[in-house]
Image: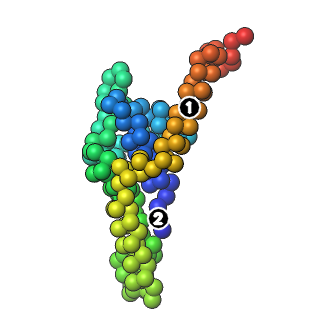
Amino acid sequence: MRLTTKGRYAVTAMLDLALHDQGAPTTLADIADRQGLSLSYLEQLFSQLRRAGLVKSVRGPGGGYRLARATPDISIDDIILAVDEEVDVTRCGGLGNCQNGHKCLGHHLWQGLSQQIRGFLQGIHLADLIKEPQLVALAALQDQDLARVRATQAAHPLRGDGLRHK
């Protein structure tokens, strides 16, 4: 299977965005902090998600990102495809040239599995996932952790040399 961290991170970031869609844009820095992801990597992913029409950017103070479509209209498959990921378990990318230019003995099996996985991911939408109580509870814990870290940072600002003031 070729689903890499790129696809996983994109799904995670989109879930975070959907869970925090309260009318105001969400910053990538907030998503990065809550999910423990690289901000520069998120910027690359969101550029692709924006080109695919899944998110829209809001510029200026208070800017960030918002979903470009309603959560019932965004499937997990849409997200994975937007960041150029493939969910394919064949060795040949579905071309049928797996063994010396011909199909291998397992080609139809692996192609069928790939289609099942793709169908499964097409059938799951952000709206389905953000209603799951476990996911909502986990997001609330992440929000509390982030608030605690930011409160600590505000109470103990760093000097220009990176050391805390005494």
- Which residue occupies 41% across, 40% down? 19
The residue to which callout 1 is attached is 144
Residue 4: x and y in percent read: 49, 58
Q: Is residue 92 above or below residue 65?
A: below
Residue 89: x and y in percent read: 45, 72
Amino acid carrying label 1: it is Gln
Q: Is residue 94 above or below residue 75?
A: below
Amino acid carrying label 2: it is Arg
Q: Is residue 42 left or right of residue 53?
A: right
- Which residue occupies 29% across, 38% down? 56
Q: Earlier in the sequence, mark 2 or mark 1?
A: 2
Q: Quadrant of residue 20?
A: top left
Q: Is residue 64 above or below residue 79?
A: above
| Disc number for residue 2 | 2
- Which residue occupies 32% across, 41% down? 67
Q: Is residue 158 left or right of residue 38?
A: right
